[in-house]
Image (cartoon, grey):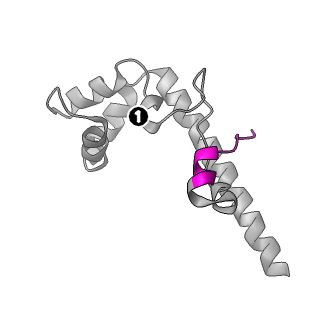
């Protein structure tokens, strides 16, 4: 899975550092943000499970979920298969990036 170059990161951080950035190439959207990885009303389901106010934003929901160990499994079970699929793809991207990074480090150690 080849991830396209992030030109905004290149402008801000330079070409070398921008190689460490990945876009989330999921579904029909080209530039997906983390909060867009949740489909339909999945964030609302999690917000309700955590008993947060209706106007709670993405950051508040995720931060509360992070600190609510007992509710994580219930939250995962309540979200759609599309959202789960999005995060599986993200997991694959992260693993490939990590493996590529390890390979570069081991090649550098050989020099």
Seen in the image, is 51 located left or right of residue 43?
left
87 and 6: which one is in front? 6
Where in the figure is residue 55, as x and y percent of width and height?
18, 29
User: Could you tell me which secondary element the residue under label 1 belongs to?
Assistant: helix
Residues 106 and 16: in front is 16
The percent coordinates of residue 4 (x first, y second) are: 70, 40
With 26 as the anchor, is 37 left or right in this view?
left
Position of 33 compared to 14: left or right? left
Image position of 13 (left or right of 53) = right
Q: Is residue 30 above or below residue 101?
A: above
Please tell me how many numbered marks the rendered image carries: 1
Q: Position of residue 31 (x, y in %)?
A: 56, 33
Residue at screen point 52% across, 32% down: 32
Asked where in the image residue 25 lies, by quadrant, the reply is top right
Q: Quadrant of residue 29?
A: top right
Q: Which residues are magenta?
A: 1-11
Q: Which residue matches tag 1?
A: 35
The picture places residue 74, in percent across and down from the top left corner, at: 32, 32
Image quarter (top left, top right, bottom left or bottom right) of the C terminus: bottom right
Q: Is residue 39 above or below residue 59?
A: above
Which quadrant of the view contains residue 64? top left
Magenta segment: does it hold 8? Answer: yes
Q: Nearer the viewer, residue 89 or 8?
A: 8
């Amino acid at each position: 899975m080849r991830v396209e170059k992030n030109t905004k990161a290149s402008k801000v951080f330079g070409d070398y550092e921008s190689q460490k950035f990945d876009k989330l190439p999921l579904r029909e959207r080209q530039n997906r943000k983390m909060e867009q990885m949740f489909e339909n009303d999945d964030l609302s389901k999690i917000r309700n499970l955590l008993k947060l106010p209706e106007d709670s934003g993405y950051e508040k929901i995720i931060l509360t979920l992070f600190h609510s160990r007992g509710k994580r499994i219930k939250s995962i079970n309540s979200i759609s298969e599309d959202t789960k699929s999005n995060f599986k793809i993200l997991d694959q991207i992260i693993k490939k990036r990590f493996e590529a990074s390890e390979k570069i480090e081991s090649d550098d150690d050989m020099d």
